[in-house]
Image (cartoon, rainbow, N blue to C red):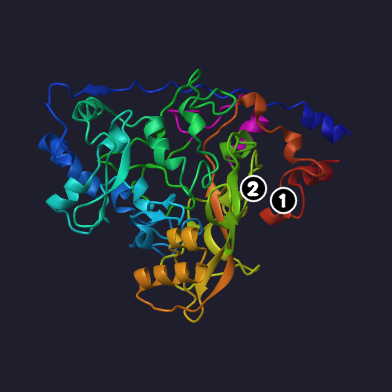
Amino acid sequence: MRTKQILLAVTVAGLLATPAVARKTYSHQKYFEHYEGTKTCLKCHKKQARTFFHSQHYQWKAEASNVVGAEGKKLGKINQINDYCTNPVPMWIGEYVTPEGKVVEEGCSKCHPGNGTLPGEELTDAEMENMDCLICHASGYRRGLYETEEGGWEWKPILWKNQVGLDSVSRRISLPTRTMCLRCHAASGGGANFKRGDLEYKQTDCDTDFDVHMASDGNDMQCIDCHAGEDHRIPGPGADIAGNEMPDRNIKCDNDDCHGTEPHGQAILDTHTKRVFCTACHIPVFAKENPTNMVRDWSKGIYSEEKGKHVYTATFEKEVKPVLRWWNGKTSHMQEAGKPVATNDRGEIMMAVPVGSKDDPGSRLFAFKEYHAVMPVLTEKRWLLPIRTGVFYVSGDMTDAVRQATSELYGLDNAEFDWMPTVHYMGLFHEVSPASQALGCLDCHSDGGRIDWAGLGYEGDPLLALFQKSH
């Protein structure tokens, strides 16, 4: 009882507010008469186009300096297999239409900042003209998928036949805003908040209870306030993002520009920050608005009358409690395409696992979304296989969808494959709650608390052990 009284006496103080950076907008009214596609931007911005060509946003890969065993390699979604939509190459662009005439898939390039061509390795004029600058820099810009005269596909502004409207939108140029970033990042994995869990459309205009940093009536921070980089390179990879464009520019809450190393004003809490990262206490739940995908089983397809297509079996959850894991900034077991899978002691393929332990002084406890899936694996070589998702959505034939994608990516026909479970940890850094809603001591240090002490390497609650030792 005495222990609980002592613990209950400790409260979490408010964190320092972080002022938002002043926004810059640029009127392009005087720079051109009509917007004629990317070539209009290139008249003034060829240097910026060259830097963007080399960026992770365009190439979908970057040097994997934080991935154990991948030093010197460039990794990203373009050459990895993930357990959401698998790999973009076999599903780059195109319409997949059901017999009823419903378009159920348009390809992964829908969220690529290009006009529809798969990015190449060599910088050319064609590559620069493939860039879609407006998707990140023009407020209100929208685009759609259109068939070309040659029978291919391309992304074009939905106002491409309305020159007056297109000219108006193309002059609304600014640095990227939350709305622009969330166009793609809030819908990754196939739908609203499906993948990340802590990036939702609501953050375009939310209150402080939802996200203290992005709240429109609070700090009103934009994504680039933390993720501002140089030459289109963006800092801030999570534990499951292989490419790291700016390894010397890690985003931290405890630097001098933000909250500092002793933000609470109470020694017992500030002592925690040495081994416990801010998000462990200040993101008590995630997926506050839209449920997030926690389990995705590609081996068990069903037909959804509501969606009018075949879908994987999935579990979605809302207001999910994060799991805590030690992390020192390194990640293991990123699944590169064409490499044998590695499994844990439960037989799960490790898709992205944070490296760290309580005995590693460079590790701290971070909040993570723990996601599980079931994926196809090549029987002999034990490679993870991609899925041509559009084929499955239309026909429901998973074997055909896997074999088509495997032929496209690996050049293997009639692939034989098995199904295996996966585990995937994603760092949580958004939807930070107000200090008044942060976890209290007894949320972790009590019987039935939310922490798996054994899983973190302890014999039991270390605080209770400390009290027992001192009494």
Which sits earlier in the primary sequence, circle 1 or circle 2? 2
Along the line of sight, the residue nearer the viewer: 123 or 439: 123
Residue 177 appears at what percent x and percent y? 37, 29
Question: Tag 1's secondary structure?
Answer: loop
Task: Give above or below for 381 relative to 2.
Answer: below
Left or right position of 266 against 238: right
Q: Identify the image quadrant of residue 137.
A: top left
Residue at image x 61%, y 54%? 314
Tell me where the magenta segment starts and ends, as one range.
253-274
Given this view, does label 1 or label 2 mark the residue nearer the observer?
2
Residue at the spot x=17%, y=46% of the render?
A: 129
Residue positioned 73% across, 44% down in the render: 450
Asked if the stretch drawn in magenta spans residue 264, the answer is: yes
- The answer to whether one can see residue 58 in this image is yes
Query: Is 53 above or below relative to 48?
Result: below
Indicate whether 196 appears above or below 376: above
Image quarter hosting the C terminus = top right
Q: Amino acid at mark 2?
A: Val
Q: Is residue 161 left or right of residue 403?
A: left
Mark yes or no: residue 457 visible: no
Q: Which residue is mark 1?
A: 452
Residue 193 percent location from the top left of the image: 52, 42
* Up/down of 297 relative to 216, above or below: below
Residue that label 2 marks: 323
Under mark 1, the amino acid is Asp
Which one is nearer the viewer's eye here, 2 or 181?
A: 181
Tags 1 and 2 in contact by the CB under 8 Å rule?
A: yes
